[in-house]
Amino acid sequence: MQKNNKNRLLTVFLVLVIAACVQIVFAKITNSGQPKFDCTPNPVTVNSEVTCTASGIGNKNRPINIFWYDPSGIQQNESYLCNPIGACVSVYTPTSAGVWKIELLKTKTNTIEAVVMLTVNGI
């Protein structure tokens, strides 16, 4: 009877250790490398909504801001809607035609993580 209890405790301990290892490996995979950053649709027609998404950012790189610059280089929008697992979304409607620059910026270190060039066509 006592041997069964020890085996159960050992099994529970091993399961907990394995679960912790899986969490560590998953965190390293999801937080490694460059983030994925894309805006859709691209190209788009002026006055149409665009959604930019960033993933693979991870908690270590937060806070993150997404800046939208019009064809003249003037900042038109800033957002920082990120969830705890490192995914960010920014939705904006460009109001002028031309090539817009959207930057994913790590604000803690003022580092540009990624850039998307968005083509906005006139009507």
Image: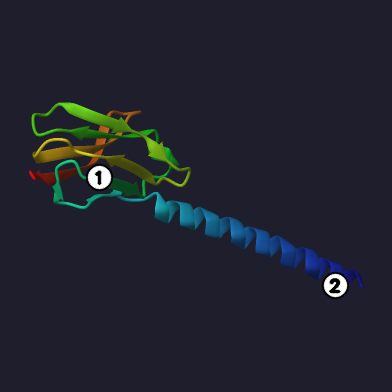
| Label 1 neighbour load within 10 Å: few <14, some 14-19, many 20+ | some
Three-letter code for the amino acid on which mark 2 is drawn: Asn
48 or 63, nearer to the observer: 48
Task: Specify whether 100 is left or right of 107.
Answer: left
**Label for residue 4?**
2
- Render colour scheme: rainbow
- Label 2 or label 1, whichever lies nearer to me, is 1
Q: Position of residue 11 (x, y in %)?
A: 73, 67
Q: Residue at x 9, y 41 (%)?
A: 99
Which quadrant of the figure has residue 3? bottom right
Q: Position of residue 60 (x, y in %)?
A: 42, 39
Three-letter code for the amino acid on which mark 1 is drawn: Glu
Toward the top, the furthest residue is 74
Q: Residue at x 35, y 49 (%)?
A: 55
Residue ID for mark 1: 49
Q: Position of residue 63 (x, y in %)?
A: 39, 33
39 or 55, nearer to the observer: 39
Q: CA distance from mark 2 to mark 1?
A: 63 Å
Q: Residue at x 14, y 33 (%)?
A: 70
